[in-house]
């Protein structure tokens, strides 16, 4: 279970982020960044820039602009996904008097459909679109699939006038499994004063419980009326978390996934998961 401050911080990172009126073209950003460096006492011609960007070719344009403005090809400080290679600080520092590092995750955008997370690969045979950042989206896929299974296999049952019931697939009730989507059951099913839940009936692959009053209240009029219905996207991020095997050390690819696993419920339920993941990684 997360502490309320941790949940608050994910919500703050994602909800306080505004794009409208805040975007700036790289061609304007880089000169301003250069001027900022000078304002900090850095000397023209003595600055060695560095970038912690993904290896994606879409990152070429900013690299060219940085090289042009700073008069030096930027040192490569990044790993795929936009993770900073902290073991490269020492060599970078030896290559100039003044040093600057810029770190960012990247997110594709298709202006025609106003969709984040895809990028038109003009060098491919048919100029197709693919996910971007591909590495981040590759990591997210397993979590999205787990979320989709939960959305499809938790059912809101029509009210029986006494209470509202919810049926949950047995796999999702197995809280001890080594990896998967783990439900925050105290927020989903009702418990009495003694901590006992009200099991309504047992089905072949699921069990049906009385739903928690808070869940019933938050879903409101969207609760199933005549026929049972899957919970779908009404399964909000506060109601679950993930467990997944990670191979983590400071410099591994698992580092990127480790940064994303706790906020992952907010990422998979976000209208633009690639954008949400990039915000989290950058923060
Ligand atoms: Zn990438």
Image: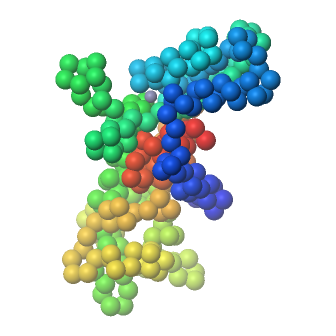
In the figure, residue 126 lies in which quadrant? top left
Asked if residue 240 is positioned above or below residue 201 in the image, the reply reads above
Horizontally, is 271 left or right of 72 in the view? Answer: left
- Give the quadrant of ligand 1: top left
Q: Position of residue 241 (x, y in %)?
A: 49, 54
> Is 117 or 161 nearer to us in this picture?
117
Q: Residue furthest right?
A: 41
**For the C terminus, which image quadrant?**
top right
Horizontally, is 202 left or right of 211 in the view? Answer: left
Q: Position of residue 43 (x, y in %)?
A: 76, 16
> Is 102 or 45 nearer to us in this picture?
45
> Is 142 or 78 nearer to us in this picture?
78
Q: Residue at x 24, y 74 (%)?
A: 228
Q: Residue at x 32, y 38 (%)?
A: 110
Q: How is the image coloured?
A: rainbow
Q: Residue furthest left?
A: 126
**Residue 125 visible in the shown view:** yes
Q: Residue at x 43, y 36 (%)?
A: 107
Q: Residue at x 40, y 48 (%)?
A: 272
**For the N terminus, which image quadrant?**
bottom right
Q: Position of residue 222 (x, y in %)?
A: 33, 75
> Is 32 or 51 nearer to us in this picture?
32
Q: Residue furthest bottom?
A: 161
Asked if residue 123 is positioned above or below residue 118 in the image, the reply reads above
Q: Position of residue 84 (x, y in %)?
A: 61, 26
């Amino acid at each position: 279970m997360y502490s309320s401050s941790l949940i608050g911080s994910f919500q703050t990172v994602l909800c306080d982020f505004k794009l409208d009126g805040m975007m700036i073209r790289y061609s304007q950003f880089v000169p301003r960044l250069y001027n900022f460096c000078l304002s900090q006492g850095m000397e023209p011609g003595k600055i060695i820039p560095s970038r912690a960007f993904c290896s994606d070719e879409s990152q070429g344009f900013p690299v060219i602009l940085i090289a042009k403005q700073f008069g030096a090809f930027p040192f490569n400080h990044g790993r795929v996904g936009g993770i900073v290679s902290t073991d490269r600080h020492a060599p970078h520092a030896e290559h100039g008097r003044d040093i600057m590092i810029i770190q960012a995750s990247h997110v594709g955008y298709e202006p025609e459909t106003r969709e984040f997370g895809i990028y038109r690969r003009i060098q491919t045979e048919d100029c197709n679109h693919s996910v971007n950042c591909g590495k981040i989206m590759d990591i997210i896929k397993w979590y999205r699939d787990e979320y989709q299974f939960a959305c499809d296999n938790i059912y809101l049952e029509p009210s029986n006038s006494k209470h509202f019931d919810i049926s949950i697939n047995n796999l999702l009730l197995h809280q001890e499994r080594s990896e998967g989507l783990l439900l925050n059951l105290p927020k989903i099913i009702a418990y009495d004063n003694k901590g006992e839940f009200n099991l309504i009936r047992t089905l072949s692959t699921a069990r049906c419980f009385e739903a928690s009053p808070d869940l019933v209240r938050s879903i409101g009029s969207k609760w199933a009326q005549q026929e049972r219905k899957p919970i779908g996207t009404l399964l909000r991020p506060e109601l679950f978390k993930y467990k997944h095997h990670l191979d983590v050390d400071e410099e591994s690819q698992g580092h990127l996934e480790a940064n994303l696993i706790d906020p992952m419920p907010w990422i998979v339920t976000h209208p633009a998961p690639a954008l949400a993941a990039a915000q989290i990684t950058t923060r």
